[in-house]
Image (cartoon, grey):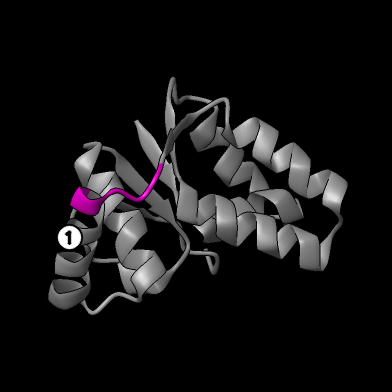
Amino acid sequence: MLVLDSSVWIEWLRDSGFASRIESIVRDQEEMVVPTIVQLEVYKWLMREKDRRQAEAFLAYSQQQIVLPLTTFLAVRAAEAHQRHKLATADAIIYATALHMEADLLTCDAHFKDLPGVVFLDKGV
């Protein structure tokens, strides 16, 4: 099981040279977990950088996955992750969601790099 950080979704949707690496990892997954905060961040980015059609297509695809809303339990776990790892609020929610679901977190963001359960994709490689 895998949680994709917003940074990975954006690289994938940008169809950057990095997208093929993401695709090779994602295609082997039977299930992906999508925190609702990721839906918000990626939808917002698509509306700003692309258009509503692409934003709606992303939502439709993401809703075929396991969508996990922010609950009180996850909010508390995110607060703990924020305090322990000095993560920003959205990142703490995403990380707490991955931990709760016992899923790996796939990310391009270096601030996650050394955390347990994180698969870090270095865009420079």
Judge from the rendering whether residue 43 lies leftward or rightward of residue 63; answer left or right: right
- Quadrant containing the N terminus is top left
Q: Is residue 1 in view?
A: yes
Relative to 95, say whether 62 is above or below: above
Residue that extends furthest to the top in the rendered view of this protein: 30
In the rendered image, residue 103, in percent from the top left (x then y), is placed at 28, 38
Q: Which residue is mark 1?
A: 76
Q: In the rendered image of this protein, does residue 36 appear above or below residue 95?
A: above
- Closest to the observer, 91 or 110: 91
Dot 1 surroundings within 10 Å: few (below 14), some, or many (20 or more)?
some
Query: In the figure, is residue 13 to the left or right of 97?
Result: right
At horizontal 67% and vertical 55% (from top left) the residue drawn is: 43
Percent from the top left, x then y, of residue 23? 60, 37
Give the residue drawn at x 49%, y 36%.
25
118 inside magenta stretch = no
Give the percent coordinates (x, y) of residue 2. Answer: 38, 37
Range drawn in magenta: 69-73
Q: Given the image, on which type of amino acid does mark 1 rest?
A: Val
User: Does residue 117 appear anywhere in the picture?
Assistant: no
Question: How many numbered dots are placed on residues in this image?
Answer: 1
